[in-house]
Structures are given as C-alpha cells and as structure tokens.
Amino acid sequence: MEWFASGMRRDICILLYEDEQRAQSVKTALQRRYDRRIRPKQFEGCVNALVDAGHIERRVDGIADVLALTETGERGVENQYEWLEERVA
C-alpha cells in the first residue's frame, strides 16, 4: 500500500486504530516511540497526506486538532497487521 510507504504515516494510523486522539498526543507518542523530536512541519505533512488520501479525518475541538481513522484507514492497518503477522509467525 502506497500510503504505508512512510513509516510515520503508518504509525500515525496504528496509534489512531479504534481511538481518536488529539494531534499533539499522537505526535508525543511518536516522539517517545522513535526516541527523537519530530519537527512540527514533518508531522503536519504526514497528517495532511493521510487526510488528503482519506485515511484519517481531522476536526477541531476548541484549540486542538482531533484525529480519527476512517474505515479505509482501519482496513489499511488491518492489512498491514496481517502482512506483518505472516512474516513474523
């Protein structure tokens, strides 16, 4: 799947699987996972690409962006999981 060619895009979708979250919480979780700072423009570019591709939705709640996985995004995460499970098992 082309949209999973970016590890950060894939990981954003994984973090949103069955759980909408504030964008800042997702970015913080990624920074902890990667053990490095993520530039705001890099993160925003990944989010925008996922929104444009229809894999996540963004809404504003007060001053925060809230991200949620779409059905298309959920299928992508599930397909990625199945593929990984076949390789690791």
Image (cartoon, rainbow, N blue to C red):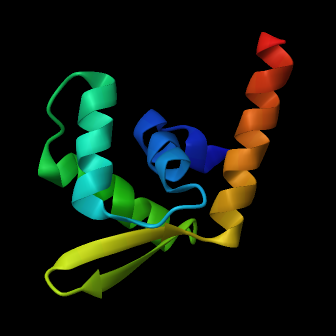
Tell me the quarter of the picture where residue 31 sits: top left
**Along the line of sight, which residue is nearer the eye, 36 or 47?**
36
Q: Position of residue 42 (x, y in %)?
A: 23, 47
Q: Is residue 76 left or right of residue 45?
A: right
**Residue drawn at (80%, 15%) of the image:** 87
Q: Position of residue 2 (x, y in %)?
A: 62, 46
**Residue drawn at (67%, 48%) of the image:** 77
Q: Is residue 7 left or right of residue 17?
A: left
Q: Is residue 15 left or right of residue 35?
A: right
- The total of numbered circles placed on residues is 0
Tell me the quarter of the picture where residue 61 sits: bottom left
Quadrant of the snapshot with the N terminus: top right
- When the figure is inspected, residue 34 is found, relative to residue 56, above or below; the finding is above
Quadrant of the snapshot with the C terminus: top right
**Residue drawn at (34%, 73%) of the image:** 66
Q: Position of residue 20 (x, y in %)?
A: 46, 67
- When the figure is inspected, residue 67 is found, relative to residue 8, above or below; the finding is below
Residue located farthest toward the front when viewing the structure as drawn: 19
Q: Position of residue 88 (x, y in %)?
A: 77, 12
- When the figure is inspected, residue 25 is found, relative to residue 34, above or below; the finding is below
**Residue drawn at (70%, 66%) of the image:** 72
- When the figure is inspected, residue 53 is found, relative to residue 84, above or below; the finding is below
